[in-house]
Amino acid sequence: MVGTRDYVSSLCQLPATDGNFESALKSASIVEIQRAIFEMRNRNGKDKGRIAACERELKRRENGR
């Protein structure tokens, strides 16, 4: 079992097109995704693609898909 910090780290570090990123995104809880978004927004990196992917996943879950 992967720990919470591992999902957040994966979402914050891997390219959004990476299969491991996509797997972490599907397995992470809503809170973990929100935490990753928070961390990415509060650093000076190029995280637009990762943030967008996380936000799409949250919206997908919100709509029940």
Image (cartoon, rainbow, N blue to C red):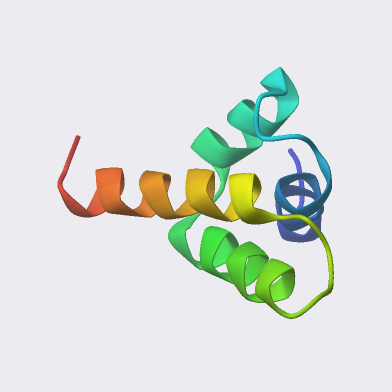
Residue 6 in picture, x, y percent from top left: 80, 50
Q: Quadrant of the C terminus?
A: top left
| Residue 5 image point, x, y percent | 79, 60
Quadrant position of residue 41: bottom right
Residue at screen point 76% across, 54% down: 12
Please name whichever residue, 46 or 22, is drawn nearer the observer in this view of the structure: 46
Above or below: residue 42 compared with residue 60: below
Query: Is residue 10 found left or right of 19 in the rendered image?
Result: right
Q: Look at the picture and state if 57 lies above or below 65.
A: below
Image check: 41 left or right of 29? Answer: right
Between residue 53 and residue 31, name the one nearer to us. Answer: 53
Where is residue 18 shown, x and y percent of the image?
72, 23
Indicate left or right for 34 with 8 as reference. Answer: left
Q: Residue at x 37, y 53 (%)?
A: 58
Up the image or down, 24 lies above or below 40; here it is: above
Q: Give the residue displayed 74% in from the left and 38% down from the top.
A: 1
The residue at the point 71 percent across, 55 percent down is 47
Question: Farthest residue in the bottom direction?
Answer: 42
Q: How many numbered marks are there? A: 0
Which image quadrant is residue 57 in? Answer: top left
User: Which residue is situated farthest in the top direction here?
Assistant: 19
Counting from the top left corner in percent of width and height, residue 10 is at 78, 45
In this picture, residue 13 sits left or right of residue 64: right
Q: Nearer the viewer, residue 63 or 52?
A: 52
Instruction: Look at the picture and state if 8 lies above or below 19.
Output: below
- The foreground one among 6 and 63 is 63
